[in-house]
Image (cartoon, rainbow, N blue to C red):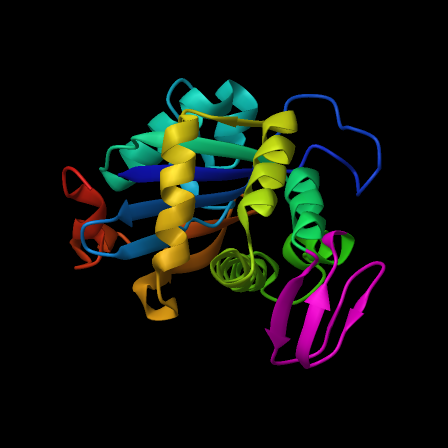
């Protein structure tokens, strides 16, 4: 089962004003969940990836959500990678920040110092609050901004899943689901969500694999893009996303 995960940055900050539509997709991740094989594969697509958006031109893939929200984003991703998206989850960044607080924070092991608008993060293990997690995954104030942010997003997601495995109880899951429903969209049923949640609880760290879409940075007509590796469809791990069932 291929699930498209979208992070939508609707608010200017935690508790800030809600930006008017259209909203772009700041996070685009494909998750392949295979309960039978006990694994989850995650592929992050940089938001600046140049892609053919149906009905529009070749431009940044994040714009697909601004033009046609989830349906157009799904079509664009499917055409870019030659895969079938079975379900989607679209979540506002401020929602996941509140979910972090429900879990009592998320433990992150930082390898280097990192500063955002409101916080300074030092190397080592630390517990991030919801507000800290929000800036940790959204900040672009460093070199390799988009790719560095993907690294942090993947580190955060790994830590979040670890927290769900190790300390989340029934009441936590209930609270997370209620918070999720407030401002998120998904094609997954409650049964699907609970099934995935309990599947994740049983996974070991090495059973969750993460990839970034290979490519290169390039300026075209003065605009910065991520150009996908033309041989991406030949990558052995891409076959995982084209398998039926799961």
Q: Point out the image quarter for the N terminus.
A: top left
Specify whether residue 128 is painted magenta: yes
Q: Place residue 11 in its image quadrant.
A: top right
Q: Nearer the viewer, residue 142 or 155?
A: 155
The magenta span reads 104-130
Q: Residue at point 84% right, 36% down?
A: 16
Give the percent coordinates (x, y) of residue 212: 40, 59
Is residue 228 among what the camera can see?
A: no
Tell me if I can see residue 215 in this picture. yes
Quadrant of residue 242 within the rendered picture: top left
What percent of the width, then of the height, locates residue 174?
58, 37
Q: In front: 69, or 52?
A: 69
**Residue 223 locus on image (x, y percent):** 56, 45
Question: Where residue 4 sits: x, y (%)?
Answer: 40, 37
Q: Which residue is drawn at the image coordinates 72% and 51% (left, top)?
A: 101
The number of numbered badges drawn on the structure is: 0
Apparent side of residue 133 relative to residue 193 in the rendered image (left or right): right
The reply to whether the magenta stretch includes residue 219 is no
Camera-nearest residue between 78 and 96: 96
Q: Residue at x 25, y 57 (%)?
A: 38
Relative placement, left or right, of 121 versus 112 is: right
Above or below: residue 145 compared with residue 11: below
Q: Nearer the viewer, residue 164 or 143?
A: 164
Is 67 placed above or below 34 here? above
Residue occupying the point 60% across, 46% down: 172
Extreme residue toward the front, this view: 170
Question: Can you say which quadrant of the picture contains the C terminus?
Answer: top left
């Amino acid at each position: 089962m291929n699930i498209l995960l979208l992070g939508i940055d609707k608010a200017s900050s935690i508790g800030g004003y809600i930006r008017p539509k259209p909203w772009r997709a700041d996070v685009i991740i494909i998750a392949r969940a295979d309960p039978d094989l006990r694994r989850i594969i995650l592929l992050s697509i940089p938001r600046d990836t140049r892609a053919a958006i149906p009905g529009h031109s070749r431009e940044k893939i994040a714009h697909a959500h601004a033009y046609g929200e989830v349906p157009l984003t799904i079509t664009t991703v499917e055409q870019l990678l030659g895969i079938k998206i079975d379900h989607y989850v679209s979540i506002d960044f401020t929602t996941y920040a509140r979910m972090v607080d429900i879990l009592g924070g998320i433990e992150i092991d930082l390898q280097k110092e990192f500063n955002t608008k409101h916080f300074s993060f030092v190397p080592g293990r630390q517990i991030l609050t919801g507000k800290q997690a929000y800036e940790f995954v959204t900040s672009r104030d460093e070199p390799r901004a988009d790719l560095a942010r993907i690294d942090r997003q993947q580190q955060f997601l790994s830590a979040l899943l670890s927290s769900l495995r190790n300390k989340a109880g029934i009441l936590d899951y209930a609270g997370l689901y209620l918070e999720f429903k407030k401002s998120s969209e998904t094609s997954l049923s409650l049964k699907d969500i609970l099934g995935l949640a309990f599947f994740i609880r049983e996974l070991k760290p090495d059973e969750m694999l993460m990839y970034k879409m290979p490519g290169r940075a390039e300026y075209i007509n003065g605009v910065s893009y991520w150009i996908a590796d033309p041989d991406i469809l030949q990558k052995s791990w891409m076959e995982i996303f084209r398998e039926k069932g799961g």
